Image (spheres, grey):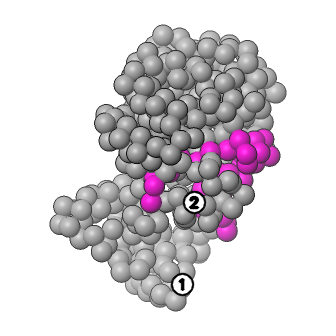
């Protein structure tokens, strides 16, 4: 059967000051009334029932996750005691699911994507589940046909076509490319042989655990010990001890790149629109603009203002005169003002606040 695992442990530092330690990005609304986390579960709900859905988040976010997802049983919310990147997260989810269903197929989804139309995503999921039965030893990733030469996304180089289901084509993977320079990104898009790497995966639980055991046996052994202790009174003690001892890394470095070079990874070329909501400029892509090309959320007065992204809490007024191409974000006790061209550097502000021990703004 198909199970779903949502990774919701990120800090969302590029969305400071709205995203804070107490309420990171996945709990925020960027388009519509539902948070990114809620939208992720909504998207998979027609395919996977709540009893087969899991959320792996930080231990500090278990209560907020339960509040936002009341349809999810509390025992399906896993709170990591420490951040250890995505390989331990994926491995633990697979080990827990395998204990309930040894033949499980799993879709792994980050909690911070916007995808539309949802029915096309669900069509791709149905196809991926069928591909996993056709190629049970393979790992599957969802590729996004690029619409522009992005330097902010990783790329997947497609090889020969391997299969097709429900109108969704499946290709061998020739290689993974990290975020490229602008000239390389243009070459990738022009070639027609590359997809954006969305970070959405489908695989058999047994297959990903086998791969992880081959490349990172320390992580594989650690998550198995946690999963074995899950039904016992020692769960929390074992969880904390094993995670503290782990040297975390991403699932891409731990498994996907080597497996891709060995021919064990395949990519679905998906039919939907995708945005990983990686920065404040995502508001422009998912919300309307005024006559000056400004994207505005909240109370505002703009005079001779063009091309800005402005967001404020209810009851807080932002007024601008004679400015353009700025990101202006107010939330609580902090306000961010940056050139749009520098918005990717918001993380530097968060790093400075940590260095200066200004925890009240984090």
| Residue 136 on the magenta span | no
Query: Residue most toward the front?
Result: 233
- In the picture shown, does residue 204 fall above or below 301? above
Q: Residue 185: x and y, percent?
A: 44, 33
- Of 270 and 180, nearer the camera is 270
Which residue occupies 23% across, 71% down?
358
**Reading the chain from its start, which is encountered first: label 2 or label 1?**
2
Q: CA distance from mark 2 to mark 1?
A: 23 Å
Asked where in the image residue 219 lies, by quadrant, the reply is top left
- Of 92 and 257, nearer the camera is 92
- In the picture shown, does residue 289 fall above or below 223? below
For label 2, the SS is helix
| Residue 49 on the magenta span | yes
Task: State which mark lies toward you, 2 or 1.
Answer: 2
- In the picture shown, does residue 111 fall above or below 191? below
Which residue occupies 41% across, 40% down?
238
176 vs 139, left or right, is: left
Q: Is residue 80 visible?
A: yes
Q: Residue 153: x and y, percent?
A: 46, 39
- Of 107 and 72, nearer the camera is 72
Which residue occupies 62% across, 34% down?
97
Q: Is residue 179 visible?
A: no
330 vs 156, left or right, is: left
**Magenta residues, as a range?**
32-60
Q: Residue 206: x and y, percent?
A: 60, 21
For label 1, the SS is loop
Which residue occupies 37% across, 25% down?
218
Q: Which residue is mark 1?
A: 314
Q: Which residue is mark 2?
A: 65
Q: Quadrant of the N terminus?
A: top right
Q: Quadrant of the C terminus?
A: bottom left
């Amino acid at each position: 059967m198909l199970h779903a695992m949502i990774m919701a442990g990120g800090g969302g530092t590029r969305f400071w000051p709205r995203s804070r330690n107490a309420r990171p990005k996945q709990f925020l609304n960027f388009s519509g009334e539902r948070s990114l986390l809620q939208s992720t579960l909504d998207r998979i709900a027609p395919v996977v029932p709540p009893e087969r859905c899991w959320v792996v988040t930080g231990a500090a976010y278990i209560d907020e996750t339960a509040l936002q997802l009341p349809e999810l049983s509390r025992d399906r919310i896993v709170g990591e005691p420490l951040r250890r990147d995505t390989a331990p997260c994926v491995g633990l989810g697979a080990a827990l699911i395998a204990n309930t269903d040894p033949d499980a197929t799993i879709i792994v989804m980050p909690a911070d994507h916007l995808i539309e139309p949802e029915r096309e995503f669900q069509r791709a999921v149905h196809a991926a589940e069928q591909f996993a039965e056709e190629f049970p030893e393979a790992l599957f990733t969802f590729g996004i046909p690029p619409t522009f030469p992005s330097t902010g996304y990783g790329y997947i180089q497609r090889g020969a076509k391997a299969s097709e289901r429900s109108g969704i084509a499946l290709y061998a993977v020739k290689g993974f490319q990290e975020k490229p320079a602008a000239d390389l990104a243009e070459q990738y898009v022009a070639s027609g042989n590359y997809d954006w790497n969305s970070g959405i995966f489908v695989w058999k639980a047994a297959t990903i655990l086998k791969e992880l055991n081959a490349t990172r046996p320390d992580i594989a052994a650690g998550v198995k010990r946690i999963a074995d202790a899950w039904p016992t009174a020692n769960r929390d003690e074992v969880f904390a001890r094993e995670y503290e001892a782990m040297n975390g890394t991403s699932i891409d470095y731990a498994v996907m790149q080597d497996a891709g070079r060995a021919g064990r990874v395949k990519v679905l070329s998906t039919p939907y629109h995708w945005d990983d909501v990686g920065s404040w400029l995502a508001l422009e892509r998912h919300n309307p603009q005024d006559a000056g090309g400004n994207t505005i959320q909240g109370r505002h007065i703009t005079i001779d203002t063009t091309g800005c992204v402005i967001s404020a809490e209810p009851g807080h007024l932002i007024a601008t005169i004679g400015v353009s191409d700025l990101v202006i974000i107010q939330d609580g006790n902090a306000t961010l003002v940056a050139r749009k061209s520098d918005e990717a550097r918001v993380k530097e502000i968060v790093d400075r606040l940590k260095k200066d021990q200004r925890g009240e703004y984090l």
